[in-house]
Structures are given as C-alpha cells and as structure tokens.
Amino acid sequence: MTSFQLPTGAPGARILAFGHYQPSNVVTNDDLAKTVETNDEWIQSRVGIKQRRIAGPEESVVDMAVQAGGKALAASGLSPEDIDLVIVATCTQEAQIPNASASVADRLGIVAPGAYDVNAACAGFCYALSSAADAVRAGSARNVLVVGSEKLSQWVDWTDRSTCIIFADGAGAAVVSGSDDAAIGPVVWGSAGNQADRIFIKDRTGFLYQEGQAVFRWATTALHPIAKEACERAGVAPSDLAAFIPHQANLRIVEAIARKLKAENAIVADDIVNAGNTSAASIPLALSRMIERGDVPSGAPALLIGFGAGMTYAAQVVRIP
C-alpha cells in the first residue's frame, strides 16, 4: 500500500509579534460602588483590581479581535497574503454561528485561510498558540494569526458583585511562524472536568456564575506543578525565566502561583490591576503591553499558563519576540 504524501513543516515555531486592544471605557471600583454594594478597598483586597475596560454596545468580539490582530500583523512585518491560518480563542461570542475567525480574517484582508475558533475559556489562548505551533511544524500552515478576544461584559450580571467586579473586555493577538529553532516550547495541558460546575453559564439567556473560593483553592494548589512541568519540558529552569505571564484571573492567584514557581528573576504580569479578567485575551494582552513598555527583552524566555472554566489549563515557555 502506497503511503500518502505529507507536507514538510518547519523544525520549530516562533512568535513574530504581539498586538492588543482595549476598549476606551474605563470602569473604576468607585463606579461599581454606585450600583452594587461594594467599595474600592473590598475589591482590591479580594481580587487586586482597581479598574477594568468595558466595551460599548457597538463593539463585538470580532471588532476587538480585528484591532488586536491587525496590530500584531503589522508588527510582524508580514502581509495578509502571508497568513494561511487564523485561530480565535473566545468563549463570549454573541452567537456561535458564524465563527469569529473567518470574519476576523476577512476584515483583515486575509483571503481564504483556514479559520476556526477555540473555546477553552481562560486557557484558550495557550491552546490556540500550541495548535498554531503544531500546524506550522507539521506543514499545515506557514504563518498563523492567533487571537484571544472576549466581551465578558455581555455575559455578566451587573447586580452580582461576585462577578461584575472581576470580568472585563479586550483582545490580544500573536503571529506564529516557522523557525529553525524551537521558540515555542511543548505544551502541558489538561482538564479537571469533575469541577466544570465551578464556572458556567446555564443557558443562552443566563449569566456567568462562579464559585470563587473553590476556583481559588483549585488554582493555587493544582497549577504550579503544571507551570514547573512546562519549564522542564522546554529545558528552562524557572530561575532563567525573564517573565511569567499567568492568566490574569485574580491578583492573589497570580501571586500565589508565582511564589510556588520560584521564578525569582522573572517579571510577573499584573495586568489584572488595570485591565480586569479578560479570559482568553488576558495573556496576550498582558504580554503585548509588557513588550510595548519595554519591560521584557527580546529573545528572553517567558512562561505562559492559562486556566479557567472547564476546568481547562495549558502552559508553555516561549521566547519573547
């Protein structure tokens, strides 16, 4: 029997550039205190957030993805014609059909790419990034646009102080291409489906529900071994990391994982303070802003770990573009 011919991919994959977008509407803790029983001290002591960005009614998941994706594409030096796969990580589309990725590609002038959405909730960007790297190495794609975009504000009950203080809107994107060297490390991913009822939306008319304390306990006990394993698989010691970018779920969770990881030389992303929890957008948004500010050097190793509803998680070490 004759074997099928298979494409030859690149030896490795790398991130060429990042881009991000945040809505202009800033909602402070004091703003929320006008509509729900809360205050700035209470919110900061529990989740570490001072303010968040909320999209207007005219801004969609696709709109924000286009903004972030366009910036990443421009920074990469590639043209729309160079992109042959678009992956959008999101769990907050207004409707499930059509998907976000094909619309994002069309609006960016990317003609006839492969296009699909990934829903792994707050771990979505890391899942999509790994899928993009695998596609490049397998020869299924040459260059991939990966976007995390979320409009959580439309799935939040703004009278529920346990959720409305946390979630926000935004988008982050990266362009992945082939490389002679591996600059996106092996993914360590998994799920704890027996705890899927900790974060959920009951039906299409419902709001996001979260058991905050249960999620906190799970995240602060289960995830640092995953982060360490991602470093081990990439051959990078935690002490060699220049940056640690965990999903921006809660500042106390971020700090707890960072302490247990013992990456003493790494800058730890704390984008949640001023951006809130933007689910699949939080990691690329935070890292893009760190790069823009000049906080992290090009070529240095950074550890990403996403985690959230499902409960899904994924981690990998990447080199900063």
Image: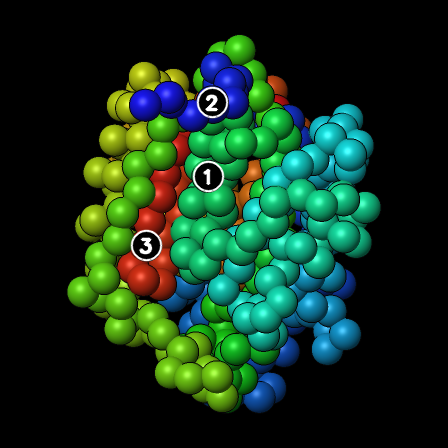
Mark sitting earlier along the chain (3/1): 1
- Marks 2 and 3: CB-CB under 8 Å? no
- Kind of element beneath mark 1: helix
Disc 3 target residue: 312
Is residue 289 at least partly visible in the picture?
A: no
Distance CA(mark 2)–CA(mark 3): 35 Å
Q: Image quarter for residue 185? A: top left
Is residue 82 at least partly visible in the picture?
A: yes
Q: Residues within 10 Å of mark 2 (few under 14, many from 20)?
A: few
| Left or right position of 45 against 154 | left
Q: Nearer the viewer, residue 50 or 200?
A: 200
Disc 1 target residue: 131
Please name which of the two marks, 1 or 2, marks the residue nearer to the observer. Answer: 2
Disc 2 target residue: 5
Q: Nearer the viewer, residue 29 or 215?
A: 215
Mark sitting earlier along the chain (1/2): 2
Query: Which residue appears at 45% of the width and 43% of the height?
Result: 126
Q: How many marks?
A: 3
